[in-house]
Structure formats: C-alpha cells, structure tokens
Image (cartoon, rainbow, N blue to C red):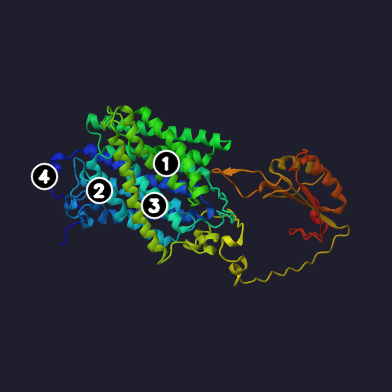
Amino acid sequence: MLAPYGYQLLDSASAIASYNALDTLWLIVAAALVFFMQAGFAMVESGFTRAKNAGNIIMKNTLDMAFATIAFIAIGCSFAYGTDLAGLGIIGVPDLFLSHTDLSNGYTSGAYILFQLVFAGAAATIVSGGMAERTKFGSYCIYSIIMCAFVYPVVCHWVWSGNGWLYNMGYIDFAGSTVVHMIGGITALLGAFFLGPRIGKYDKDDKAHAFPGHNLTIAALGVFILWFGWFGFNGGSSLGISSFELGTLTGEVLLITCLAAAAGTVSSMLYSRFKFGYPDVSFTLNGCLAGMVAICAGASAVDYYGAIIIGAIAGITVVVVAEFIDKRVKIDDPVGAFAVHGACGAVGTILVGFLANPDCYAGVAGVLYGGSLSTLGIQCFGVGIIALWTIITMGTVFYVIKHTIGLRVSAEEEISGLDISEHGLASAYSGIMPDLHIIHDESELGMSVQSMAAGAQAMSGMTVTDFSAPSAEGLKKVVVITRRTMVGALKASLDKVGVTGMTVTYVAGYGAQKGHASLYRGIEVDSTLLPKVKAEVVLPAKKVNEVVAAIKSAVYTGAVGDGKIFIYSVDNAVRVRTGEAGDAAVSNESA
C-alpha cells in the first residue's frame, strides 16, 4: 500500500510532546482569515476595472488559490521550508507532497503548511490586477503555477525558513512586505510591461487616459475584507498565542497593523486632496492597503509612532508612484498593484532600518533609535536582491510565454471584453449595459475599424404591416433632453396641461458645456458625457405649443445645461389594446 502522503507524523514522539492546541488553533484561524483575503483581492480588482472583465478577474483570483494549493503543497513548500540544500540557505530539498518533511513545532505540520499556503496564494493573486483586461487566461494560469511552485518559495527559504542566507544576515521581514507583496508587485509591473497598455490607455501623443473602475462600492468592500484578513496575515505571523510573550506580540502586531492602515488611509486622502483638489476615492482605498503592506516587515520591530510614520509615508508613496508609472513610465497598471505592493513593500521594509525600536519584540535598533547603519544596509540589500531575483525569474517567464503561446488577447477580444472572449460570459452583471470602450485613434488598435468589422453578417429587418388609418390632423413627438434632476418638475408640469403619459430614458451626453471635467486617479476622464434624462411625448399637433411651453417652464434655470427640445412628425400611432389610431391612440384612456 502506498504511503498516505500528507497525513503522517515522521517523528510522532517529539511532535506529540511539543504539541500545543492553542497555537495550532491560532494558525488555523489565521490561515482562514488570510484565505478570505482572496475575496478582498477579487473585489478590489474587479471594482477598479471595467464591468466587461469582471468575470475574468474573478476566475483569475479563484484559479490563483486553486493552483497555489496544488503547486505549493506538491513542491513549493519543500523548497521554502524543507531541509536546507547543501547548507547554503538558498533553497530547501525538493520533497514531493512533503512525504518526508515534518514542520510541526508546537503547532501541527498541517496547520503550519496551511498557513504558509494561503500566503503563496496572496502573492500570486496580487499580479492579477496589474495584468487585468488584456491577458490570455491560459497564459496567466501558467504564470500562477510557476510563481507558487518556485519563484515565491525560494524567497521564503531565504527569509523565513530559519536557516536562509538573508535571515542569517539579520534581514527583517516579519510578515511579508517583500517576501509576499514586493514580489507580487514587481511581477505585476513586469507582466504589465510585457503586455503593453490597454487599447485606448495612451493616445498617439502619449497622453494617458483614465478607465474608471466600474464599481468603487465593491472595491471598498474588498478593502474592508482585506483589512479584516490582515489580522490573520500579520497577527498569525507570530505563529502562536499560547504564552504571555506570544499573546503580547500578537496583540501588539494587530494594533500596529491597524495604526498603519489608518495612517495610510488618512495620508493618501489628504495628499490626493492637496494634489487634485478633492479626496480621491480610489487612491484613498489604495492608501489603506499601502499602509498595511508597508507595515508587514516591521510589525514586530517598530512601536506605535513608527507604525503611524510608515503608514503615512506609504499612503503618499502609493499616489506618487501610481502617477509616475502611469504618466511617466507609461506602463498600464489598472489597479496600482505595483504602487501598492511593490513600491510600498520596499519602502516599508527599508524604513525598518530607520524606525526599529530595540524595546520591541524583534529587539533591533534602527538608525533613529541609536542603531548602526548596518541594519539599514541589510534591509536595503535584502530589498534589492529580492527585487533582482523577481525581475530575472518572472521576466524570463513572461518573455518565454509572450514569444511562444502568447500573453495578450487580440484587439477584438480586448474591446469586446474578456468575459465574453475568454469565458463565453455575456456579462457578469446580467441585464446591465456594459461600459463603452472609447477608441481615440485607429492606430491604437494596430488595425482599421473597417477590417475588424469585415465578415460581419447583415441581418434583414422585420417587416411590419400597419393597418391603422392615419391621423387627420397629424401627430408630433416632442423630445426633451435635460438634467436628470428635472424629471419630477417635468412630470408635474406636463400633468397640468393634460399629458399623463411619457417615456423617460436615462442617457448621457453633452452640448455647449462640453461635459464636466473629472479626474480618476489623477488622470482626466476622457468621456465628457454628462448624465441626462430624455423624455418623449407623442401628442396631437394642436397641443405642441402648449406642451413645449410647459416643458420650458419646468426645466429652465438660465444656466448652461438646461437642455434642448426636439419636435418630430409622426406618421401615425396605434394603441395595441384597442386598435385605436391617430389622436385617439395618444389621448387619455377612460377609467
């Protein structure tokens, strides 16, 4: 009979002797919290992108966790936490499904593996947002497997295995500012670079255009879920709560995490208010995440003051870096994955070299607390070497994928949306009209619009026979397009002149005012379409002047944007229920 892989104790006597139920329970609870962060990532990424790609975002986040589970347990975990290969502190001995590895240490081996597994899933799913809206689904799946099976586990071994070479140098990354977040952020930037920008993101003059997220409410929900999950992410990294020391550490880490999140939120809000003239919603949400990303490294090494400083710096960093990447470097990162995770992960780790308080659990003194420059130097070196590893490995992966099976979908597929082109899903929001994809110039497509339409089949219209008699006096259709706030006044005014039926449609457009200038993440939104309402009334020709006067009295303010009234001739009208035609069809029905 085959050995039951994954369900055995290789040294049962020592494992039982050291077993602690409370520490094991804490790891399981923390793992569940971190697992729930996948839902948060999915909500943030889908909310910050367009509705036509929401299903694709959800699929990638789901598959990230699925692939992480298989790849990390099968081989990645042994690379990360297995017996050190050759005593060099570089990588663990490969061990398929951990058949010869016992990682119990008070907690059970299974609980520890589960906790580390969900970290691998988080590292992988960070990349989804940076590569959103134009990546081939199959190509993304290949990346995800490689990340969880090899690239991420190697860095885990360097820093967290207990005998890794960076750990032995004194490098501090308590919960993954670089090990998880910076790796994910840099990989997202590399993926976005190899993909190229979304169609329409930059025009022929290299001006950046904004693609507003379709649902900031969902994005905000995602941020709250992530904040909640971060209690397991950072708090669980204490690996136990059974002793007073571990319980104190866990409690302090949770408070430190909350302080950094709050400081990042506030500083990002204030900085966006200063820079753009209003507190930007999306950047404020990013600022909250940036604060938590940055504090992961030093959660056991800094005090409350340090947490607030790190969070505040991260909140400003995320705005500055996101704008720099978008407007200067011209790499299209739809959700700011690199700014949040890559840049702020690096900044938070380096700041430990300045702000580490020797009275805290880690017992390390930063430069501002009388420590030597060596701690700061080690932090900077560790950030650099992990960044270099990520660039070389993941850059190679994306290069090979791009030049073999391809990394990016076609222009037609991108414009139609990945929900339909990659998953056969008409819309993730059934019954809701999808966003329009505005194209500024045919050169953005690399092909003419006519060639894209080639082959489209024409459909014959339906022939309708009208058996009703024409109206003797004639009918008119009066259409008014005005502000949406005028619907109530318009209805009341028309009621007074005997018009009790009208068709109202919510539309978007602009006239002489050329729309309302707005910004999204510091970039002017291209669509200058304002929310309007279109009301249509069909009536006998003799009542037109009276109805037009009633409309004008209802919607007139004297300001630009009052709207316009259009009058059309109507050949005839037929009431379906009674068969009445002409004036009778548009007159009030009897009770």
- Spatial CA span between label 4 and label 3: 43 Å
How many other residues sit within 10 Å of disc 3, few (<14), some (14-19) or many (≥20)? many
Residue 346 falls in image quadrant: top left
Which one is in front, 212 or 220? 212
Report if residue 471 is visible in the image: yes
Report x, y in % for residue 561.
Answer: 73, 43
- Spatial CA span between label 1 and label 2: 29 Å
- The tag earlier along the polypeptide, 3 or 2, is 2
Dots 3 and 2: beta carbons under 8 Å?
A: no
Check disc 2 and report its element: helix, strand or loop.
Answer: helix
How many other residues sit within 10 Å of disc 4, few (<14), some (14-19) or many (≥20)? few
- The tag earlier along the polypeptide, 1 or 2, is 2
Count of numbered circles in the view: 4
Dots 1 and 2: beta carbons under 8 Å?
A: no
Residue underneath mark 3: 187
Query: Residue placed at 79% from the left, 67% from the top?
Result: 467
Q: Amino acid at mark 2?
A: His
Report if residue 118 is visible in the image: no
Check disc 3 and report its element: helix, strand or loop.
Answer: helix
- Spatial CA span between label 4 and label 1: 40 Å
Residue underneath mark 4: 13
Q: Amino acid at mark 1?
A: Ile
Q: Which quadrant is home to the N terminus?
A: bottom left
